[in-house]
Amino acid sequence: MSPDSIMPLWQGLVIILVAAVVTQFTRWLPFLAFSRRQLPDRIVYLGSVLPYAMMALLVVYCFRKVPEETAAFYGLPEVLCGILTGVLHYRWGNMLLSIAGGTLAYMCFRQFILI
C-alpha cells in the first residue's frame, strides 16, 4: 500500500467503533466500580471542590488575553460581560441562560459597539 492510498471504508468503521466502545467504557466504569459500595471520602471531596476549581480555571482562561480590538477599552467589554454572566447565574441559577446571556452580550459588544 502506498503512502498516498486511502483507508478502506471497513477500516475506518472499525476504528470509529473501537473508539466509541472505549469512550463509553470509560464513562460507565466509575458507575460500575462504585455501584455496590459507598464512595470514598476523597471522591466525595473532589466532587464538591472540582466544579468551583474548573469555573475559576475557565475565568482565568477567558480573561488571560484581551483582543487587540478591545485593548483601547482596557478589557472593559470582557469584564462587563463576565459580571453580567455572574449576575444572571446568581439571579436565575440557570447555567444555559447565564452562558448564553454573557456570550450574546459580548458578541453584541464586538459586532456593534467596537466597530
Image: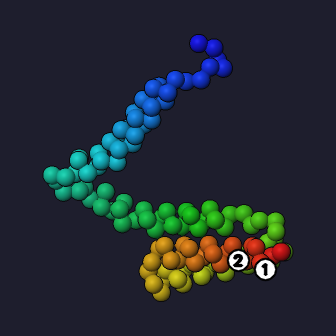
The answer to whether 114 appears left or right of 20 in the picture is: right
Vertical relation: 92 (above or below) 61: below
Q: Is residue 97 above or below residue 47?
A: below
Name of the residue lying farthest toward the front:
9
**What residue do we see at 62% from left, 62% from top?**
61
In front here: 95 or 42?
A: 95
Q: Amino acid at mark 2?
A: Cys
The disc at residue 108 is: 2
Q: Where is the C terminus found, in terms of image quarters? A: bottom right
Name the residue at 78% across, 80% down. 113
Looking at the image, do the residues carrying marks 2 and 1 touch, with CB atoms under 8 Å apart? yes
Horizontal side of residue 60 vs 21, given as left or right: right
Q: Is residue 17 visible?
A: yes
Q: Quadrant of residue 74?
A: bottom right
Q: Residue 69's quadrant in the figure?
A: bottom right
x, y (%) of residue 83? 60, 81
